[in-house]
Image: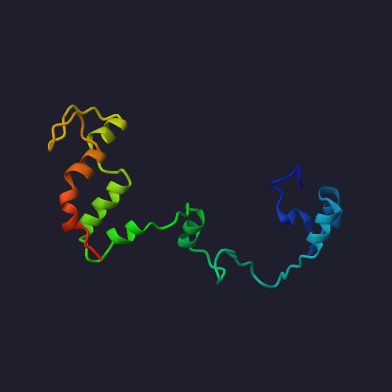
Amino acid sequence: MDGCPNTKVNWYWKNSEWDIDKLKHDTPQHVMELILQISFTLEQPDHMHWKLSHNSLFTTKLAWDYMRDHKPALNIFRKIWSPRIRPTISIFMWRLLNNWVPVENMLKQKGIPIVSRCCCCFSKEETITNNSTEHLQHLQKDLVPQD
């Protein structure tokens, strides 16, 4: 089997039972013993079995949950997705925390040439840090309800 990774199970199946000669030739003894313990019921149709679900059924949600990178939830994200905050504000704050706000330095990093200055303080360049710390602090009380 080591030399034939694409060999199908039916290659080792003959006349409704395992073909022991082929198994002896292609597999180590301990693997062959394990294979011979597997029984088939030919009268029943095949069925799919998804090991990651409690009911054996496949869903894209379960597949995505298995594949994605699990990170610990941050308390700040619970606060910005509060029902008391308008969704547009939550989306903006989420984008800000993930560095996805299209400020000048971020656009330059993506190869988009821009020649401008920060419209609020006229510093050399508009950055997320510049905007979020100096110009948006006064909005915090309006945007994020205090618990």
The image quarter containing residue 10 is bottom right
Q: Is residue 15 visible?
A: no
Instruction: Report the number of discs.
Output: 0
68 or 25: nearer the viewer: 68
The image quarter containing residue 104 is top left
Q: Position of residue 114 (x, y in %)?
A: 20, 28
- For image coordinates 49% across by 62% down, the residue present is 62
85 or 51: nearer the viewer: 85
25 or 122: nearer the viewer: 122
**Colour theme:** rainbow
- For image coordinates 16% across by 58% down, the residue present is 142
Q: Is residue 29 above or below residue 131?
A: below
127 or 69: nearer the viewer: 127
Q: Position of residue 84 (x, y in %)?
A: 22, 65
Q: Position of residue 18 (x, y in %)?
A: 81, 61
Q: Is residue 35 visible?
A: yes
Task: Determine whether, in the image, residue 27 is placed left or right of residue 116.
Answer: right
- For image coordinates 12% across by 36% down, the residue present is 119
Report the quarter where the C terminus lies: bottom left
- For image coordinates 85% across by 57% down, the residue present is 20
Task: Determine whether, in the image, residue 87 is placed left or right of residue 74.
Answer: left
Q: Position of residue 124 (x, y in %)?
A: 19, 28
